[in-house]
Every structure is written in structure tokens, then in C-alpha cells.
Image (cartoon, rainbow, N blue to C red):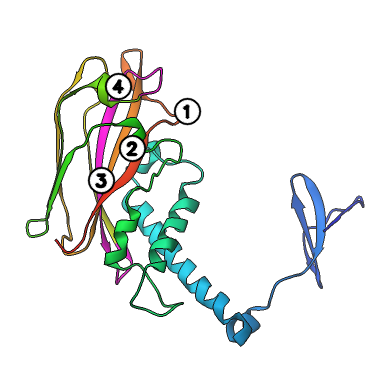
Amino acid sequence: MAYQKSEIKLEGQVGDLVFYKQSNTYRARAKGGVDAKRFATDPKFERSRENSREFGRASAMSKQIRLALHEVLPLFHEGTMQTRLNSRLRQIILGDAINDRGDRGVQPESLPFFIGFSFNSGAAWKDVYYAPFEREFNATTGKLTASFAEHWASTVLSPPKNASGVRFTVAAIAVDTEAGTCYGAHQHSPVLHISGRLPQQFFELDIEYPQFPVVLLAGLAFFTEKGGYQIPIEQPLGNALDVVDVFVGT
């Protein structure tokens, strides 16, 4: 790497030199890497081509999941979410025992490895909500239910200091592993006051394609009261949305 010191600053490529701007400084470097034709045909790069194809599948499935959850994610994701999601899906793909390396993909039996993934790296479900909850999926009717029992808020919640309210979210993703597509459904509770008891919460989702594996997510978003209105707390982000269960072959 070299710095450009002349009065004329360049960006782009001239021959084997690449000129670019980084962190408000202008730099130059030699063109590197392997040309596309060699990468696609040279046997030396076969392992790299295999890895590239599988990374591509992980990235594509990650995008499908984010699209399925696009109405849910705004209060839960942070800057590392996409990278971490890609990485988790890559690990799930490595669990494919059916296909050869390079042709592996997301298989239904590997999806339980998704359990425990937190869409917010700063707050996991187990760290903000301490009580178990009941859930059931009926693949015949396509009904997915989740029930949270009544509790004293102080015994089951770990809210931010300025929180006055909390909202439960239950979401589900039906994953067509062959087509590489996802279909989402979700429900929110009302914003509940965190002083006193939290009433029982019951959710019922209609899964559009119940023949596919279904990934269940549970979330909590915290609110603070301003001017008589409950406003989401976004800084610091203490909301949690985690994969808590996967229903396969039910």
C-alpha cells in the first residue's frame, strides 16, 4: 500500500495499479487477486470454489430470513446481526450429511442448530426473560400457539433502568429448504406496564405453509413513557429476539 501525495488525487484503476480513498486519505496499491477465469477453472481453486458456493447459499438464506422478519426486526437488530446470521447459517450448512462439499445446503434436520441465535448480540432472550413458556405447533391445521403465564414482572424480567413498559413478540418462519425461501408470521402483545403483575399472554399464528420446518422466535421490546405515550427504547438496545424452537417433521 502507498499514499498519494500529489495535488491531483486519483480514484480508479490504471494498468496494474488501483487508486482509492480510505479514511479520508488517498492510497494506491497493486492490483491483486486471481482473475475470474482462472478461479473458475484452475483445479488449485476447487476448494475455494466449493466454499464460495456454500457461503453464497448461506447469504441467500440469510436474506430470505431477514425478509420474512422485516416487520419485526427494526426494534431488535444491531450492526453485527447480518454477519452473525450468515455465520450461523454457514454452520447449519456444514451439518448437511446428504450432499458433497460445495453442494451442501440447509437441511431440515440441521435447522435445530439455529436454536439460541440472538438477533441482538447485546441481549439474549434468556437474559431478559427468566420464565419458561408453552408452545405447540400443529402441522395439520397450521396453528402455532405460544402461552406466557401470569407473573410478577420483577421476578421474570430484566428491563433497562428507564423502562416502564414491555411488549412480547412471537414470530415464526416456515423454511422451504429446497427452494431456499422463507415465509413469516408474527404477533405482538399490547405494551404492558412492568410494575406489578404481567397478565397471561396467548398467541396464535397461522402458518401459511405448515408442511415446511417452522422456526419459532420469541422477543421482548422495552418502552419508556413520554408525554403519556409509550416510546420504544432504542439506545442502548436491550431488546431480545431469539430463535427458541424449531419444529421439523411434526
Mark 2 / mark 4, whichever is N-terminal: 2
Q: Position of residue 204 (x, y in %)?
A: 13, 43
Give the spatial CA distance, label 3 vs label 2. 14 Å
Q: Which residue is mark 2?
A: 125
Q: Label 4 neighbourhood size at 10 Å, few (<14), some (14-19), many (20+)?
A: many
Magenta stretch, residue numbers: 159-181
Q: Along the line of sight, which residue is nearer the eye, 177 or 122?
A: 122
Q: What's the amino acid at mark 2?
A: Trp
Q: Secondary structure at mark 4?
A: strand
Which residue position is annotated with label 4? 165
Indicate which disc, 3 or 1, sits on the residue closer to the N terminus.
3
Q: Which mark is residue 31?
A: none
Q: Which type of secondary structure does the marked residue at label 1 adopt? A: loop
Image marks 2 and 4: residues in contact by CB distance under 8 Å:
no
Vertically, is 195 above or below 187?
above
Discs 1/2, front: 2
Q: Quick one: label 3 or label 4, which is nearer the N terminus?
A: 4
Residue 237 percent coordinates (x, y): 44, 31
- Residue 106 placement (x, y as % from top left): 35, 67
Q: Residue furthest top?
A: 227
Q: Return the residue at label 3.
A: 171
Mark 3 vs mark 4, CA separation in Å: 20 Å
- Residue 103 is situated, as x and y percent measured from the top left of the image, at 42, 78
Residue 126 position (above or below residue 150): below
- Answer with left or right where residue 238 lies relative to residue 34: left
Q: Which residue is mark 1?
A: 236
Residue beneath the point at 30% across and 25% down: 157
Marks 3/1: CA–CA distance: 23 Å
Query: Which label sits in the foreground, 2 or 4?
Result: 2
Q: What residue is drawn where x is 81% and y is 55%?
A: 27
